[in-house]
Image (cartoon, grey):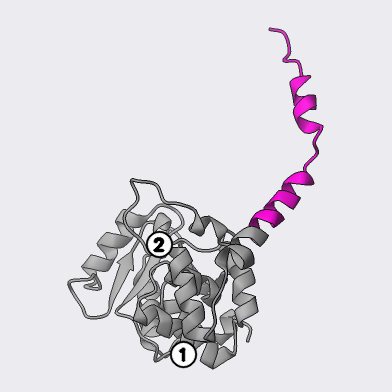
Amino acid sequence: MEFEAERIDWRGKSGQRLDEFARLLPREPQLQLTVFGSAPLQLFVEKTFLSEDIDLFSDEGRTEFLTTFVEENHWAKDQTDFYIQVCDPLAFKSTIDWPSRAILVERHGHSFRFVHPWDVLVSKLQRLEEKDLNAFRVVIDKTGHPTEEEFARHLQLAVDLYRPKFDEESARGDMLMNTKILWHALWAREIDVRARIIRPALERSEREYRTIDQTLKARLGNLRLPEK
């Protein structure tokens, strides 16, 4: 199944709320907004798969403006049962190349960037509560993908999420353990995370590094700055 702008189902709860949101936004300046979390799954896969909110962030640093706009329209968390959560861009963590798969859509003069469902699933793996497992089941049941092998390769693009966290970071799920739980729940088998995800990803990175011109450092060292 291809995830394309033409396949968006705007009739569901998320689609209707986002359409209204875009229609009421001031026409100027034109904004680019990234939508992640469960909303892309509702729009592209199953409109009845509902969360309690829509997660989005501004690509132009307009967080304060959007937060105020959402509150003025009574769409904030404490104002309605189905709310819009304006987030910092750093709140979304997924594969390193997720922007290349995002689906771009123009709506009422503004640009929406919907995170690809597979990259949404990677972000949900970091927490992996029961509702996150259900998201995996819905996507696979409806589309037949990702398969076990496809998702293992996809997670190689998120290898940095398996690195130890900084002491200052808030507690998040254990990616390595969550991946093992996911494999057991979806495919009823064990997975060696280091062998199938971490090691291949690091080997790919090392191969790419070796293709860099190894004479570059020496040539840079021989550069002479113009005399003043």
- The image shows residue 142 at horizontal and vertical percentages of 53, 92
- Depth order, front residue of 216/174: 174
Q: Would residue 4 be counted in the magenta stretch? A: no
- Amino acid identity at mark 2: Phe
- The image shows residue 120 at horizontal and vertical percentages of 48, 72
Magenta part of the chain: 201-228
Horizontal placement of 11 versus 214: left or right?
left
Residue 57, numbered circle? 2
Horizontal placement of 175 versus 72: left or right?
right
Callout 1: SS: loop
Quarter occupied by the N terminus: bottom right
- Amino acid identity at mark 1: Glu
Circle 1 residue: 46
Horizontal placement of 87 versus 106: left or right?
left
- The image shows residue 199 at horizontal and vertical percentages of 64, 59
Q: CA–CA distance between discs 1 and 2?
A: 23 Å
**Mark 2 residue crowding within 10 angstroms, few (<14) / some (14–19) / many (20+):** many
From this view, report whether residue 129 is shown above or below residue 85: below
Q: Is residue 168 visible?
A: yes
Write the residue at 38% across / 84% down. Answer: 16
- The image shows residue 28 at horizontal and vertical percentages of 42, 60
Write the residue at 67% across / 61% down. Answer: 200
**The image quarter in which residue 154 lies:** bottom right
